[in-house]
Amino acid sequence: MHVHPHPRALAAGGAALLVLGLAACSGGTASATSAVSSSATATSAFPVTIDNCGTEVTLEHEPTRVLLVNNDSVANLEALGAIDRVVAITATPQTGLYSADTYTALDALQVLSTTTNSTGGSVVSQEAILGADPDLVIAPENAVDRTALAAAGIAVYSPTAYCADPPAELTQTATFDRVWDELATYGRLLGLQDEAAQVIADTKAEVADLGAADAGTAVALYVSSGGSVLSPYGGPSMVTPVFEAAGLTNVYADSDQRVFDASIEDLTSRDPGTIVLLYSGDDPEATRSAFLSAPGVSALTAVRDDRVVTLAFPYTDPPTVLSTQGPAQLLAALAELS
């Protein structure tokens, strides 16, 4: 299940959330030499140290046992050909986003937790994580105890969208550079720099080819608590460049917060021409119904004009290869309104 990365979901840490071979060649000297060369290149890249949310994270060796808290990194791992390194997950992934092989690989893994917090984030114990024997945990920063896991010899990487105290550059208006920076970081962490460079080149071309016409203003909302809480995404979120590539202008692009709760009065005052409802799980109509039942939304122009669409959350945040597919998905949804 993909979770809504609202600050409340990330703040559910504390005591409750102490959280994650080469195939034989068929014969040819050239193939064997290539495999050895690739392995040597990856090995020579380690140890590697990166700055992650203001904390230095060091991997002494290429990680081969990755534990995922939530599913936000599946897309990037899939793009880099590293799904086979995942040894444990905390939630089943949203359907319709990944290849059949990826779902098969993840379905074969034990789900460490079926418990979630109020906004869908996984709640998993320290013991469960240690029992999976990972060498790298990828998780929202406030969903893990970095210190405790580091003491156990386990590195933790948090996708930059989930830094508890984001550095100044992450409070600025997002661009697709966030995706490419994240891919480059994953490449370094996993010893897959060449693969990352190729994926970056491919996704840059994908975004550049859209050429969408101006489609007016819009807001992206995550709806929770049965429709009583509306959370728009601001300038630092990937919603902003996804909207721009699809010809839309984010009415909350002036906010330096990635996601926050807003009143219906403020939303009405900004009067977006289109409302994009971001949904987790596999029932977008449930999200639409919850939103349309929220008090005051009938006053919104987009509701009166029936310009409300749904978009699977992973096509926006956090920055992944799915973010670069978001504009095309959004354009398809907008086309159905015409």
Image (cartoon, rainbow, N blue to C red):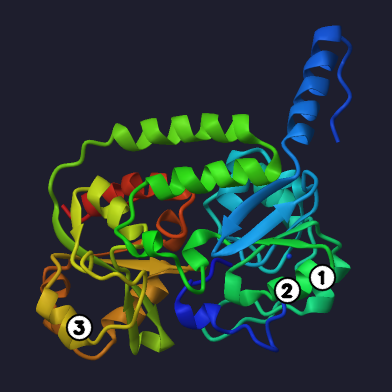
Location of mark 2 (residue): 147
The image quadrant that residue 71 belongs to is: bottom right
Mark number, residue 151: 1
Look at the image and tell me whether residue 321 can be seen: no
Q: Is residue 64 above or below residue 67?
A: above
Relative image position of residue 98 (x, y in whole percent): 57, 48
Q: Earlier in the sequence, mark 3 or mark 2?
A: 2
Tags 1 and 2 touching, CB below 8 Å: yes
- Residue drawn where x is 29% and y is 68% of the image: 234
Q: Is residue 229 above or below residue 204?
A: below
- Residue drawn where x is 79% and y is 29% of the image: 39
Query: Residue flagged by tag 3: what amino acid is it?
Result: Val
SS of the residue under disc 3: helix
Relative image position of residue 23 (x, y in whole percent): 85, 29
Location of mark 3 (residue): 297
Distance between mark 1 and mark 2 Cα atoms: 6 Å
**Quadrant of the frame with the N terminus:** bottom right
Query: Residue flagged by tag 1: what amino acid is it?
Result: Ala
Between 336 and 174, the residue placed more toward the observer is 174
Numbered disc in front, either 1 or 3? 1
